[in-house]
Image (cartoon, rainbow, N blue to C red):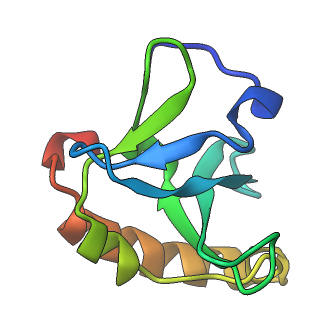
Amino acid sequence: MNTTSRSDTLLGTEVRDPQNEALGSVDDLMTNPQTGKIDYVVIARGGVFGIDEKYVPVPWAAFKIAPNLSLLVLSTTKDAFSSAPQASKAEFMLPGRFDAVGQKVDSYWKTHLSDKGSD
């Protein structure tokens, strides 16, 4: 990504696959407690008005940003996205859980990204 983005611009941004199918929208950005850098984008999918939403963390490096910053593209399939590990909003925040959840998320996405060059 060669584009500078503000967090308030990214939150709520639509996420689509390369076939232009909607996957969800950006709900949160997770920073690594050791590096302070953004490691994951948390995508909210399903639910109505925040009720029964599922939260899917995806490595930040897996995304491509549309030139006008109106959407993020994730090189995966809708089926792979639906099967991705989910995390509660608080799960990353629990002491010692960031690394454990991150390893599970990273392992899944390493094998399920269509564009292997994005990880």
Residue at horizontal 56%, vertical 43%? 14
- What's the residue at 40%, 47% (across, down)? 16
110 horizontally vs 58: left or right? left
Residue 112 x, y percent position in the rendering? 22, 68
**Residue at x 62% of width, y 14% of height:** 4
Q: Position of residue 58 (x, y in %)?
A: 48, 60
Q: Is residue 56 above or below residue 88?
A: above
User: Could you tell whether 50 is left or right of 43 in the image?
Assistant: right
In the figure, 74 relative to 58: above or below?
Answer: above
Q: Nearer the viewer, residue 93 or 66?
A: 66
Q: Residue at x 55, y 82 (%)?
A: 86
Say left or right for 67 vs 5.
left
Quadrant hosting residue 106? bottom left
Closest to the observer: 7 or 23? 23
In percent of width and height, residue 88 lies at 73, 83
Q: Position of residue 67 (x, y in %)?
A: 45, 13
Marker count (numbered): 0
User: What is the residue that sits farthest to the front in this orientation?
Assistant: 48
**Image quadrant in which the N terminus is located:** top left
